[in-house]
Image (cartoon, rainbow, N blue to C red):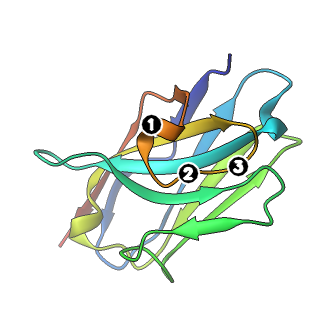
Amino acid sequence: QVQLVESGGGLVQAGGSLRLSCAANGRTFSTYGMAWFRQAPGKEREFVAAINWSSRGTYYADSVKGRFTISRDNAKNTVYLQMGSLKPEDTAVYYCAAAKGGTYYLTAPGYSFWGQGTQVTVSS
């Protein structure tokens, strides 16, 4: 069992940057693959980025590739999402998720644990 707590969301102007953090409890963080998803009002939750246990594997949605960077610090039990060149369409609640086995998946059912979400609002 792992509990995830996101932070770092807020209001930012288009073109700006934010860094989201997701802190996990427990001593087994390094055994999980991690991901960020987001959900905008009236839309389904969508995949944003993922990283495997060793940080050697990452994957990004086309919509954020080149603008967002996912990373993790296993010593701090934390995964990050550095977001740059933000656009109004990036406005959403951002969730981090953990997948057992250290790998990552591109769809939500692959993840066993979820945080409560943090709101990101990008104004035009």
Looking at the image, residue 77 sits to the left or right of residue 1; the answer is right
Of the numbered discs in the image, which one, if any, rests on residue 109? 1
Residue 3: x %, y % from top left:
62, 21
How far is mark 2 from mark 3, CA to CA?
Answer: 7 Å
Q: Name which residue type carries label 3.
A: Thr
Q: How many marks?
A: 3
Q: Which residue is drawn at 48% across and 78% down?
A: 65
Looking at the image, residue 58 sits to the left or right of residue 107; the answer is right
Residue 71: x %, y % from top left:
70, 60
Q: In which quarter of the image is residue 24?
A: top right
How far is mark 2 from mark 1, CA to CA?
Answer: 8 Å
Q: Name which residue type carries label 1.
A: Pro
Q: Mark 2 points at which residue?
A: 105
How far is mark 1 from mark 3, CA to CA?
Answer: 13 Å
Q: Name which residue type carries label 2.
A: Tyr
Q: Mark 3 points at which residue?
A: 103
Along the polypeptide, which appears first: circle 1 or circle 3?
3
Image quarter of the C terminus: bottom left
Q: Which residue is drawn at 40% across and 77% down?
A: 62
Tag 2–tag 3 contact (CB < 8 Å): yes
Q: Quadrant of residue 25?
A: top right
- Identify the element where label 3 is drawn: loop
Image quarter of the N terminus: top right
Tag 2–tag 1 contact (CB < 8 Å): yes
- Position of residue 46 relative to residue 115, above or below, is below
